[in-house]
Image (tube, rainbow, N blue to C red):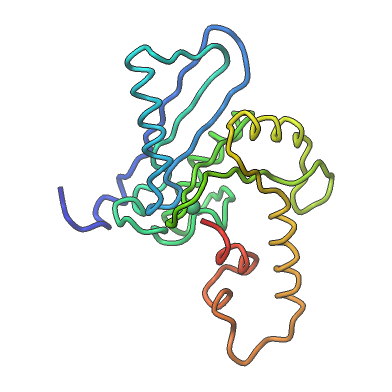
Amino acid sequence: MSSDPLAGTATDSLRIHTFASLNPGPRLLVVGGVHGDETCGTEGIARILAEFEAGTLQLQRGELTLVPVANPLARRRLQREGERNLNRLFRPSDTPADYEARITNVLAPLIARHEVLLDLHSFQSDGEAFSMIGPRDNTGTLEPFARSYEEGQLALHIGTPIVVEGWLDIYAAAWRSARAAPRPTRPPSTSAAAPTNTSAAAAATA
Ligand SMILES: [Zn+2]
């Protein structure tokens, strides 16, 4: 194998494991390694796969899909990003402009055919695991949502001692204030290199 972390980007593929129960039920997608330097999700998925292989864990109903490493280039580099942050622009494109856009074109339809997404990240510092859940039910344009009850139930069943909500509103407010503010002569460091609508998010999340 080449030691060049960029080698093979043209032929990279995502490893996707799907278990389909014969009993109908919801479809759950679990993703690890969106950020290459966050390995907890990948390790957790490896444990689950091993338990399925050993027969100590069985799927009771529905489908379970596991993606151990969502960003192979970032993982090879053991860095947060490959060419850019996969988490900051996630929209399929007929003309993918970079490596992460090509990943998006594989992941987006996969996400679309599942009812539930669990996206595993990790922090570099010590601390208890926590869940971040999305917006309350709403019909707005930023993040319309109708499954907040089910999402809250999922967070409770995952069992982390802390559940964080409201963070999308904080990001949106930060984005609005950043756009409304007069352009500084020297941009603040959090927004200097970030994509247009994600300056606060880039600084705040794992
Ligand atoms: Zn992350």
Q: Would you place residue 165 above or below residue 22 in this image?
A: below
**Residue 72 percent coordinates (x, y):** 35, 47
**Residue 160 percent coordinates (x, y):** 58, 38
Left or right placement of residue 143 versus residue 28 in this view: right
Q: Could you say which is closer to the camera, residue 113 or residue 169?
A: 169
Residue drawn where x is 75% and y is 34% of the image: 147
Number of labels in the image equals: 0
Q: Could you say which is closer to the camera, residue 34 or residue 108?
A: 34
Left or right placement of residue 3 versus residue 79 in this view: left
Residue drawn where x is 76% and y is 32% of the image: 149
**Residue 13 percent coordinates (x, y):** 35, 40
**Residue 201 percent coordinates (x, y):** 60, 62
Left or right placement of residue 166 versus residue 67 in this view: right
Q: Residue 184 sits in which quadrant?
A: bottom right
Q: Would you place residue 145 above or below residue 196 in this image?
A: above
Residue drawn where x is 20% and y is 58% of the image: 4
